[in-house]
Image (cartoon, rainbow, N blue to C red):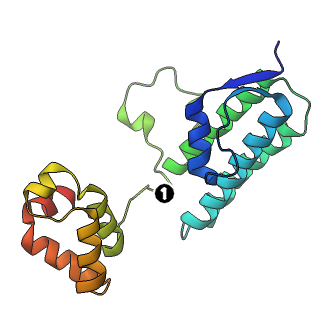
Amino acid sequence: MSDTINLDVGFGTFLEYVFGKNKYKGLAGNIKKNRWEEILSDLFDSLEKHVIVSIQDDSEQVQNIRKDLELIRSEFKRNKSIDDLNVKTIRVLFGVCFQLLGDEINNTNRKVLNRPSHYRLNKKRTLVYHSDNLQKFWQVHERSGEAKFLDDGLPGPNGLEDFFFKKLNGNADDFILWFKENHPKLYLEMF
């Protein structure tokens, strides 16, 4: 049983996405157990902060997820092997994923899972994505360099930002009206 884990460069890049480029820059290779626990602890702390800030109007959901996250923190305090820690981490992460889809999962009493209703987790809540007009602007901005957007006459990302901030004074409602009028096919495809 090893007390190290080998992290590839892609995981280091993921950590940079989560924490910025300075905290874990270039992290890769064999990592000792105590460093791995520290990294996982940082990830779970970050996940909790994202949950608290991002989930609106559902304090029960936030509390349920925080309960799962606290479960893994208690595991960090026990002297476990890396394999043990990884298995418990995976279990907690999937528990959080199911919570985010709507509720805790429990198919214990089912012999088989063969109906769509067996996978439904929306008894108490439904995951619904909503984008306000500013968020829609950033969605268009993200895709504005794609060929079909450029072919339709939409400026690239820099030109679109200039148009949005200089000509429309950053008014997202005006932008969406403009986008709908001038690029109706793209608008219907996206929204």
Horizontal and vertical percent position of residue 131: 35, 67
- Residue 81 picture quarter: top right
Mark count: 1
Q: Which image quarter is the N terminus in?
A: top right
Relative side of 51 to 159, left or right: right
Relative side of 82 to 26, left or right: right
Q: Residue at x 68, y 36 (%)?
A: 27
Q: Residues within 10 Å of mark 1 (few under 14, many from 20)?
A: some
Q: Answer above or below: position of 146 versus 36.
A: below
Horizontal and vertical percent position of residue 165: 31, 81
- Residue 88 picture quarter: top right
Q: Is residue 64 visible?
A: no
Mark 1 residue element:
loop
Q: Residue at x 39, y 58 (%)?
A: 128
Q: Is residue 62 visible?
A: yes
Q: Residue at x 80, y 42 (%)?
A: 38
Q: Residue at x 85, y 42 (%)?
A: 74
The outermost residue toward the top is: 1
Q: Amino acid at mark 1?
A: Arg
Horizontal and vertical percent position of residue 95: 62, 40
Q: Answer above or below: position of 145 versus 59.
A: above
Horizontal and vertical percent position of residue 139: 31, 61
Q: Nearer the viewer, residue 39 or 73?
A: 39
Q: Which image quarter is the C terminus in?
A: bottom left
- Residue 176 picture quarter: bottom left
Q: Nearer the viewer, residue 77 or 120?
A: 77
Which residue position holds label 1? 125
Q: Nearer the viewer, residue 153 or 186?
A: 153
